[in-house]
Image (cartoon, rainbow, N blue to C red):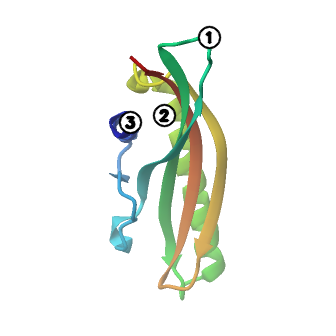
Amino acid sequence: MASKRKAIRNATAAAINFTGVNVYKHRKLPANVDLLPLVNVLTLGDTVNRDPKVKDFQNRKERIVLIVQDKGLEEHENPAAGIDAVIDKLDNLIEDLELIFTKSLQTLSGLIFRLNYVSTEIELNVDGEHVIGTAAVTYEAEYLENLV
């Protein structure tokens, strides 16, 4: 089963191909601020919907979480502007990701038959030298698993 999740993760990362964004597929985010902006593709869990009438396949839903990070201005320059800038950058990156997924389901075709947006959660860290914004964008990918 892990190979299907890995294939979905790899196809998702391959679909995220806009310039200037580093793409990762790791459980832990890189700690280097110079690597921002970045998108980290995770597959964090799945659920099974088994239909007893269908003997050969079961419907699975895999959660795909895109962790998006970017930085604002250095905190001492203008904290409020740094926060506004990083929120604007995150909004733009999230919008780009939504467009990519809407247009590139072909990249995931053969792996999934439906991709649904679930949620976005944004956090800001203003403790360090830069304002760092992190957004977790969650999708649910549906696919069939062959049982035979």
Tag 2–tag 3 contact (CB < 8 Å): no
Residue at (62, 11) in percent of width and height: 53
Residue in front for this viewpoint, 79 or 140: 140
- According to the picture, the residue beneath numbered tag 3 turns out to be 1
Tag 1–tag 3 contact (CB < 8 Å): no
- According to the picture, the residue beneath numbered tag 1 turns out to be 53
**Nearer mark to the viewer, of 2 and 3:** 3
Dot 2 or dot 3, earlier in sequence: 3
Which residue, as the protein is rendered here, is positioned at the far bottom? 76
Residue 85 percent location from the top left of the image: 58, 66
| Residue 39 visible, this angle | yes
| Tag 2 secondary structure | helix
Residue at (50, 25) in percent of width and height: 103
Q: Is residue 20 left or right of residue 68?
A: left
Measured in 3D between alpha carbons, the distance from the residue under mark 1 to the one under mark 3, in whole angstroms, is 22 Å
Q: Residue 100 carries which label?
A: 2
Residue 77 percent location from the top left of the image: 54, 85
| The quarter of the displayed image where residue 37 is located | bottom left
Dot 2 or dot 1, earlier in sequence: 1
Residue at (62, 72) in percent of width and height: 83
